[in-house]
Amino acid sequence: MTIHHAYVGCDVSKHHLDFYDASTRKGWRIDNTDAAVAEAVRSFTDGKRFVILEATGIYDRCLRHGLAEAGVVFARVNPTMARRFAQACGRRAKTDALDARLLADLGHKLQPEADPPIDTERERLTALVRRRDQLVAMRATEKGRLKDLADDAVADCIAETVGFLSRQIDILERRINTMVGDGKSLADDNRILSTAPGVGPVTATTLLALMPELGKTSPKRIAALAGLAPYNHDSGMLKGQRCIAGGRRRVRKALYMAAIAAIRSCKRMNAFYNRIADRAPAKKIAIIAVARKLLTCLNAMLRDRKQYAQ
């Protein structure tokens, strides 16, 4: 039986949420708080409402959790998609209320897939992994400032800062390892991922935290989500160069480093790399190809619940 959804658009900001229900043609605003969201979503529990919102970082957390607790399906769409949809519809005016209405129209026309159920354990892991990455970047910046320094006092200050950041990184890594080890699903996924060549602890936890679709979608879509899918640029008689675009930068970076390690340690990956490198104009293209192949293997491994076969 086909369910005909009534799409509800929601524009998310730091302090307010603006809704527009396409079935009733009514819009309203509420505070962006847990209590206000819980009250608002009570009218969505008929099983037909489908809420469309833009991905806005931390500001949509109250809404997502409130909808999940009420059993209301929703989809977070890329803000670029919403902006391009507005341009295609010829809509130039922009207010929070108009954006909510636009998102409801986008849901009706494009019918995006619903987001998977919220995994609170994975959300906590994501927060820890992102914080670790922030501290690693800060430490690298501080180490870079040590170059060409002539003042010992400044150098000592930077060294102390680097030491503090290193200790905080160690604390976070222990928390991440504990969380992955204690969570049954995370521990099983981590064990499977770690059997692949080039996939170390950091790469495995990065994929667990930032790529929840791994093992649950097609090879083409998982490559596109990671930004490792080559896109055509052809027009008429012109055949442009294929290149990757978009995707999750941190995931792509982790897979790129894992690909380099896999090329050095795995004969199969090394042979694949050499075949691509022999005809590619740049070696980096071959490394990207290995990263995409590695991601495809990891996706299949989690889907089939099997370890990497040498």
Image (cartoon, grey):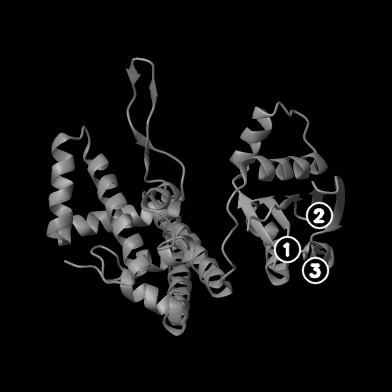
Of badges 3 and 1, the one in the foreground is: 1
Q: Residue at x 85, y 48 (%)?
A: 24
User: From mark 3 to mark 1, how far is it between C-alphas?
Assistant: 16 Å
The x and y percentages for residue 234 are 38, 23
Residue type (three-letter) at the residue carrying disc 1: Gly
The x and y percentages for residue 95 are 80, 39
User: From mark 1 to mark 2, how far is it between C-alphas?
Assistant: 25 Å
Residue type (three-letter) at the residue carrying disc 2: His
Q: Describe the element under mark 3 as helix, strand or loop.
A: helix
Check residue 47 in the rendering and tell me which mark sits there, or answer none: 1
Q: Is residue 36 left or right of residue 6?
A: right
Asked if residue 52 can be seen in this view, the reply is: yes
User: Given contact means CB atoms under 8 Å apart, are the residues at marks 3 and 1 in contact?
Assistant: no
Quadrant of the frame with the N terminus: bottom right
Check residue 16 in the rendering and tell me which mark sits there, or answer none: 2
Of badges 2 and 3, the one in the foreground is: 3
First in sequence, mark 2 or 3: give its number. Answer: 2
Check residue 38 in the rendering and tell me which mark sits there, or answer none: 3
User: Given contact means CB atoms under 8 Å apart, are the residues at marks 1 and 2 in contact?
Assistant: no
Q: Is residue 206 left or right of residue 289?
A: right
The x and y percentages for residue 90 are 71, 26
Vertical placement of 29 versus 236: above or below? below
Q: Describe the element under mark 1 as helix, strand or loop.
A: loop
Asked if residue 149 can be seen in this view, the reply is: no
First in sequence, mark 3 or 1: give its number. Answer: 3
Vertical placement of 186 versus 158: above or below? below
